[in-house]
Amino acid sequence: MQRAGAAAAAEIARRLPQRLTRGVRVFAGPGNNGGDAWVVARALAAAGIAVSVVEPIPARTPDAVAERELALPFVTVERSLNSAFPAAVIVDGLLGTGSSGAPRGAIADAVAAMESSRQQGAYVVALDLPTGVDATSGDATGAITADLTLTFGTVKRGHLVARQVCGAIVVLDIGLGVHAVRDDGAPPIVDDAWVARHLPAIAADAHKGTRKKLAIVGGAGGMAGAAVLAARAAIRSGVGMVRLLVAPESLPVVQGAEPLALAGSWPTSDAALEREIVSWADGVVIGPGLGRGSESRALVDRVLAAWNGPVLLDADALNVFDGEVAALGRASRGRPMLLTPHAVEFARLVSMDVTSVLNCRYDVGRALARDTGASILLKGLPTVVTSPDGSSLVSAAGTPILAAAGSGDLLSGIAGTLLAQTGDALTAGASAAWIHGRAAERVSHSARVRGLTLDDVIATLPSAWPHEIQPTRYPVLLELPAVGEGR
């Protein structure tokens, strides 16, 4: 508790020096989260900062009681939730890991008081979790909205689901080691160091063949842009060659839009399949702008039957299999396969409702991965990638810039490139999800979203790849930016 509180106080002091001159108001709950809050209050007061503490419910756990007694000589204890104490920083230490359900009674009143201060310009720092956020499910009914969440040892599932109310998330080391193992089943977090370790190197004597060749099948009439976006993302991801295979009426469009890619019509004969894909490609992406008719399903079936190598199915290449998981399993045939549905596509594919998919996003991909023999990349924030053996990785990178038509096509181009280069669907999917999200984060300074487009994300892709990994600033183990627009 003392390590956690001291680390949190130091991080607050480092980040908010100007605000601290106008005072801090600490809300301390009855349990150990409240104990952390008392340690923070004492540490900040010892540094000469004016600190008041509000305790809507008295400390109850032995550690919290002990820390309260140690802090009392240094802080002011307030009896009213609506004090005139001029605090520019609010510290939320009411409820942490272990709490569930919406705040009630005196805790709910304290949350309302904190939210009122926030609306008047105070900066809210949550300890462990914002009060009202369930650490496992991420349910945030009645939760305070924090500007910064300081958590300890590891990021929790709930943080990644409830990003909108967590603000920036900083994981602090309290002696448990890097990303301490938790019993909530949260998969490992993908970060820049992880991606750097798993990226295939491009050799000094590389040529377009060794950098691999990617065929992208999609681009029905009126939807050529999806295939073009996928090609542009692949080119920005280090692929050696891209071939766009689109509907005949889309061919002039894609040739004019992306001169760095080869282009041809959908391969509908065995000879065309052999020439355009089987004897040429190292990886195949099927789906961007493909369309959902019977012609599309027939094309997907033909390509999957002829091509035995790594393949990524996205968008309409998944939609044509709605409710037919067994057919996808037969098409997999043990090859490296990556399926990249968003929640609605996943729900249609497995005949679930979307709410259930979102509520179980960490676990729902396991059955589909097992039944299809493919790795499943369930898009969203967070993105969870699951392999047929049940192992998972999660990427927390991304911003609402990616909540736009065409975003999935960019991801397909990135992931398709890495799949062609590595032959590892899980690694390719997890790395691509992080790069995709990281590029969006680099575009959206200060959580700005409006006015930014996927063209900005594409332009930023070269700088999103992890080239030189900077060491983490102790005691920070992981830092995730705030997502969404501000107040």
Image (cartoon, rainbow, N blue to C red):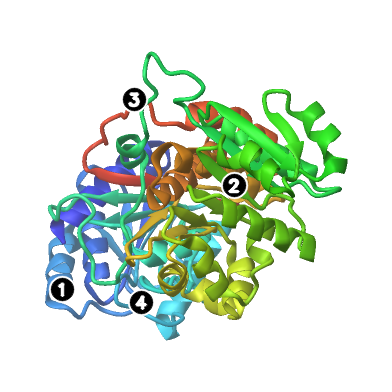
Tag 3 or tag 4, which sits nearer the N-term? 4
- Say if mark 2 contacts mark 3, CB within 8 Å: no
Residue for badge 1: 65
Q: Residues within 10 Å of mark 1 (few under 14, many from 20)?
A: some
Name the kind of residue labelled 3 in the image.
Glu
Name the kind of residue labelled 1 in the image.
Val
Name the kind of residue labelled 2 in the image.
Val
Residue for badge 4: 56
Tag 3 or tag 1, which sits nearer the N-term? 1
At a point 31% along the width and 80% down the height, the residue shown is 57
Name the kind of residue labelled 4 in the image.
Pro
Quadrant of residue 394 within the rendered picture: bottom left
Instruction: Check the image and report above or below for 291 versus 344.
Output: above
Which labelled disc corresponds to residue 285?
2
Judged from the image, the secondary structure of the residue bearing numbered disc 3 is loop
Judged from the image, the secondary structure of the residue bearing numbered disc 1 is helix
**Left/right of residue 21 with respect to residue 262 in the rendered view:** left
Q: Nearer the viewer, mark 1 or mark 3?
A: 3
Judged from the image, the secondary structure of the residue bearing numbered disc 4 is loop
